[in-house]
Image (cartoon, rainbow, N blue to C red):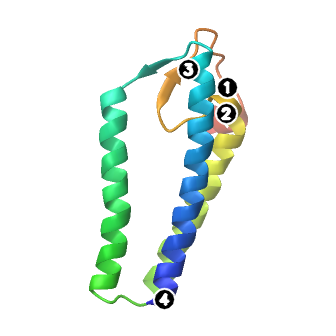
Amino acid sequence: MLLVNITFAVFFIIRLFSLSISVRNEKALIRKGAIQYGAKNSKLLAIVHVMFYFSAIFEANYLKHYWDKISLLGAIVMFFAYIALFWVIKELKQIWTVKLYILPTHQINTSILFRTI
């Protein structure tokens, strides 16, 4: 049980770090005149995202789940998902946010990530 909670905490802290990058970039984009699209959808997605994370840890604790092969598989999937997330953040640099902002002078990113995936 402890390993499940520690794993959750580690992934949650990494997610908070990525959100701090998003907030910093969002403020800079707004200062540069970026326009947000889908604000209502962004709010709903954020609410559902938080509910999902906390319902998962609640369920794990309530049902006293333990670390097993399925947990390991899930952690591996999350690990690679975070690698993909930080690859996207690296490629988009200052324009990456969890919300959709478009700058008046927005340039299309043509890196291999966005050309092939």
Q: Is 38 on the left-hand or right-hand side of 101?
A: left
Kind of residue sitting beneath label 3: Ile
User: Image quadrant of residue 109?
Assistant: top right
Q: Which residue has dot 4 on it?
A: 2
Residue 68 in sight: no
In terms of secondary structure, where does tag 3 sit?
helix
Q: First in sequence, mark 1 or 2: give its number.
A: 2
Q: Residues within 10 Å of mark 3 (few under 14, many from 20)?
A: some
Q: CA distance from mark 1 to mark 3?
A: 20 Å
Q: Residues within 10 Å of mark 1 (few under 14, many from 20)?
A: few
Q: Which residue has dot 3 on it?
A: 30
Q: First in sequence, mark 1 or 3: give its number.
A: 3
Q: Residue at x 37, y 73 (%)?
A: 57
**Callout 1–callout 2 Cβ contact below 8 Å:** yes
- Relative to 46, say whether 13 is above or below: below
The tag on residue 92 is 2
Q: First in sequence, mark 2 or 4: give its number.
A: 4
Q: Residues within 10 Å of mark 4 (few under 14, many from 20)?
A: few
Instruction: Tell us which disc is closer to us: 1 or 3.
Output: 3
In terms of secondary structure, where does tag 1 sit?
loop
Instruction: Tell us which disc is closer to us: 1 or 4.
Output: 4
**Callout 1–callout 3 Cβ contact below 8 Å:** no
User: Image quadrant of residue 107?
Assistant: top right
Kind of residue sitting beneath label 1: Asn
